[in-house]
Image (tube, grey):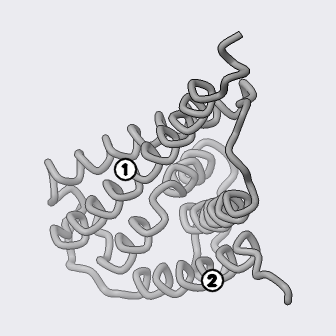
Amino acid sequence: MRTVRLSRVLPGTQIVIAVVLTAWGNRVPGPRYDTLWVSTMGLICEGINAPAVPLGILGVLINRSGPTIPSIYGFGAWDLFFLTGVVLLWFLVGRAVDHRKSRASPQRMPISRAGLNLVLMTYGAFIFSLALTMFRNPWILNNRVGTLTEGVLFAVWSLVLILVGTVNIGVYIRAKLLDPRSAK
């Protein structure tokens, strides 16, 4: 029997969900404010895919500093970079889950893996700071319910990233402490 590879299934599933939510959010008519407004569906999509949001910000910065990136099927630079980040995010999540199933207890952790876990924990702290900003200022996008919902989803993602990095390092340290060969 063939096993399902989540690194192939999750990106396809999540990109469909993200495209639907983003397109839906882009078509919702907002109030006629002279300031930024983002729909609740758009904010929920960003919250579900919180680690991909900085890639969307990068798209906006590149679009402002260089030649304008054209809109494709109604998706602007933010959306295109964000959706690319969604595919990358869920590929990495699926790959991590696929490898976790087949991995035995680690007896050694290369510097690159330890560094990756520290990056995960730091990125989790960054995402948490964004969540705190949303909790402190829920009217920042003129959509209080959407901003608070996005803040909760960002907080969940931040805790997951911090916990994954901490647990991976903790498992390695525990294996080292319990290994009789490491006492030599």
- In the picture of the structure, the residue carrying the numbered disc 2 is 13
Q: Residue at x 31, y 86 (%)?
A: 29
Amino acid type, residue under disc 2 in the picture: Thr
Q: Quadrant of the C terminus?
A: top right
**Nearer mark to the viewer, of 2 and 1:** 1
Instruction: From the viewer's side, name the closer residue of 64 and 6.
Output: 6
Image spot of residue 146 (x, y percent): 25, 71
Mark 1: which amino acid?
A: Leu
- Determine the residue located farthest toward the front in the rendered image: 180
Give left or right: position of 16 versus 166: right
Labelled pair 2, 1 in contact (Cβ < 8 Å):
no
Q: Is residue 30 visible?
A: yes
Confirm whether residue 69 shows in the render. Answer: no
Above or below, 170 against 83 in this view is above
Q: Which mark is residue 159?
A: 1
Q: Secondary structure at mark 1?
A: helix
| Marker disc for residue 42 | none
The image shows residue 95 at horizontal and vertical percentages of 72, 61
Frontmost residue, 4 versus 181:
181
Question: Which image quadrant is residue 93 in?
Answer: bottom right
* Mark 2 crowd level (few <14, some 14–19, many ≥20, 10 Å Cα): few
Q: What is the C-alpha distance between the residues marked 2 and 1?
A: 23 Å
Q: Nearer the viewer, residue 174 or 132?
A: 174
